[in-house]
Image (cartoon, rainbow, N blue to C red):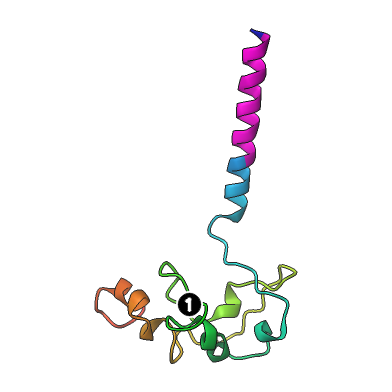
Amino acid sequence: MLRSKRLALYVLTVTAVAVVGLWTTAAKPPRLPADRDHGFEQAETRCLQCHVHTGAHPRPTDHPLRDDCFSCHRDAHGGLHPRPGAPLSVPGGWQDDPRLAGKLGGRGKRP
């Protein structure tokens, strides 16, 4: 009996740790690396040089329909740097990505 209680406690602890780990990382944009290529003083079009759908590191197909990168992606220390008036769509951004624009059902404008 004591052994089954210990096993149950172990399974419960491992499950709790896994749930907390998933909960704390779920639906959070990745942090930006602390290098010169990911500086917050640059324009979003600079981000799209690598993260456009044909780039070296394309955005995933479940990426939100937004191009104001610094409103969601945090710096290496966890800080946000939103820019008032940043465009939600820039040339080469989500509207030019057939994988992302397909989410709109052919409407062509952000919902």
Residue 29 location in percent, x, y? 57, 66
Tell me if I can see residue 111 in this picture. no
Residue type at numbered disc 1: Pro
Residue 6, image quadrant: top right
Q: Is residue 72 left or right of residue 93?
A: right
Total numbered labels placed on residues in the image: 1
Report the residue at 24% width, 78% height from top: 106
Where 78 sits versus 66, above or below? above
Where 110 sits versus 3, above or below? below
Q: From the image, which quarter does the C terminus lie in?
A: bottom left
Which range is magenta?
A: 2-17
- Dot 1 corresponds to which residue? 58
How busy is the neighbourhood of tag 1: few (under 14 within 10 Å), some, or many (20 plus)?
some
Report the residue at 71% width, 86% height from top: 36
Residue furthest top as drawn: 1
Residue furthest left as drawn: 106
Residue 47, image quadrant: bottom right
Residue 77 location in percent, x, y? 75, 69
Residue furthest front as drawn: 56
